[in-house]
Image: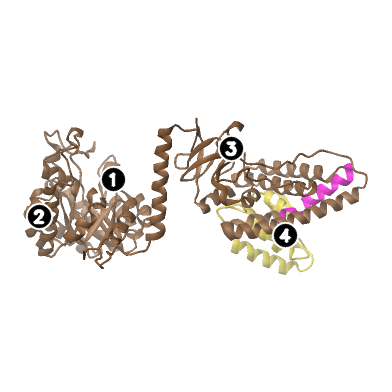
Chain colours: A yellow, B brown
Amino acid sequence: MKEITYTITDPQGMHARPAGLFVKEAANFACNVTIAKDGKEVDAKRILGVMSLGVKQGQEITLKCDGENEDEAIASLEAFLKENL
Amino acid sequence: MELQGKSVFGGIAIGKLSIYNKGENVVKRTKIDDVEAEVKRFEGAKETAKAQLKGLYEKAMKEVGEANAQIFDVHQMMLDDLDYIESIENMIRSQGINAEFAVATTGDNFSEMFAAMDDDYMRARAADVKDISNRVVSVLQGAEEGGIDSSEPVILVADDLAPSETVQLDKSLVLSFVTRHGSTNSHTAILARTMNIPALIGIDYSDDVNGKFAIVDGYEGKLIIEPDEETLKVYEEKKRADEEKARLLLELRGKENVTLDGKKINLYANIGGVGDVADVLKNDAGGIGLFRSEFLYLGSNDFPTEEEQFKAYRTVAENMAGKKVIIRTLDLGADKQVDYFSLGNEENPALGYRAIRICLTQPEIFKTQLRAIFRASYYGNISIMYPMIISVDEVHEIKAIVAEVKKELDDAGIPYGNVEQGIMIETPAAVLMSEELGKEVDFFSIGTNDLTQYTLACDRQNPKLERFNDAHHPAVLKAIQMTIENGHKGGAWVGICGELGADTTLTETFLRMGVDELSVSPSRILAVREKIRTTDLSK
């Protein structure tokens, strides 16, 4: 299992549009992908769950990838976060 | 009747109110025997709904751009969300209920979850989940979509409008959006901005308003239902002025201030503070012809420090990005008084201790301002003008003080730019001495308000004198002509920054006199530009 933490810098937080794009990105990988904030963990491939975290600017999330191609998945998703959020 | 709400986009709309027809969507709970067939029915409806959303995405792309159309892409993803789908299918299978009821209930549950979040943006997403669920239910029921029950353009009134509802609307039928709920960053608000029509939220209307005549005031956030004739007249005039402005903007932005026969002049804006710069740029002024520095003194409890002034001047110069910014030095006195600096009681304040007279009597106040202006001049294209001049001696005195300020800056190694210096021509004495004054300075700016008052000996604060205080008086026009001619003789360019500069009935007269610059309030720039561009001086 691979794990990273990331702090959201987008002033609007993890709002619908980037959350949607992030979910699409996560869906490209076969491994399990989850994100967590303040101990609440959700499936990163489900948009309603991701949005329900209500992640705002300055808040830290933990991203976990577990399974097939987890190295590639975590690198790619981390790059996505840095670029978009 | 008048209802107060909140404006999400300005403008005036006048027309009939029409309540949005949501379409019928009553969901009943029924028992189902073949649950797997019902699950299949749901899946089919979901795919149809997604196909509809794809169509809406493409329509919205054209209407409000990609960033705002994304919501329909997100909606499609929500319909594919496994939590959502599992919840619905699970309800159908375990409770043996119809798909409509399972979808509506699941939609409500998820929407409640968003509604309970502590973030405005996320709370607004509750409407999205409801919206996609309503769409699936409509497909399942074969129900018709909502719309506008009118063939003529109307003010559309609704409890709230979902993105999918607004994007489906026939936009040619909408004069304005008025909703009871909704937020300033809703899709409706974005659409209103793109369509450039007024929109209000938070208007608590009653259902009997349907079909009534009304006015939407998008500036004040008001809905006026069945206005009286007088109110209607006022708003019709406002609407006409808005339309005129919009037309001018469209036609004249970026165009030169040139007459039909090729005479070009500068058209600048008058401002009273840093906040006015946005208006200057929006209306496409070529520079700032009068930056009244009084706001720094009037809005303060003590003399503004050099640093405070420097910051304000620098900000304006930088925002104007190399375009000319003419700062008028302190013009207190007469009708402009401050508590911290008593000028004493005067019999005739308009003829009293004011403007440059204060600066030359108390040079420390003057020097602070000059230092701030010169320091700021390094960051843009700044000029200075001095108000209330009556003699060449005063100009000499000013020059001596400016030389001191420059030397101090040089000694301290503080950089400054090349600053043009001019004077306001607003006293008859300055007009009579204009030939001599023109040799001393780079430019003149004619302040027509005071020049009229002093030339005609008419107090402009006294309403009884209104009919005598005629800015079109031939004496005033002669004084302007004389100033322009003499200024040119001495090598100074000549502008007009008073109210007369914006008077389009005189634009041609001023052009014929040879004026080099007009400085008017930002909102008048384009009207004056239009006048210049339709004037032919060869005839």
Label 2, secondary structure: give it: helix
Q: Position of residue B502 (x, y in %)?
A: 26, 51
The answer for which chain carries disc 1 is B
Whether the magenta-drawn stretch holds residue B84 is answered as yes
Q: Which mark is residue B180?
A: 3
Q: Is residue B527 magenta?
A: no
- Mark 3 lies on a secondary structure that is loop
Same chain for the residues at labels 3 and 1, yes or no? yes
Dot 2 surroundings within 10 Å: few (below 14), some, or many (20 or more)?
few
Residue type at mark 2: give it: Glu
SS majority, magenta: helix
Q: Position of residue B24 (x, y in %)?
A: 73, 41
Q: Looking at this view, is A34 or B28 the one in front?
A: B28
**Residue labelled with disc 4:** A64
Closer to the eye: label 1 or 4: 1
Dot in front, 1 or 2: 1
- In terms of sequence position, does the residue under pointer 3 or pointer 2 come before the other? 3
Segment colored magenta: B76-96
Looking at the image, residue B485 sits to the left or right of residue B461; the answer is: left
Relative depth, front residue between B188 and B510: B510
Disc 4: host chain = A
Asked if marks 3 and 1 touch (Cβ < 8 Å), the reply is no
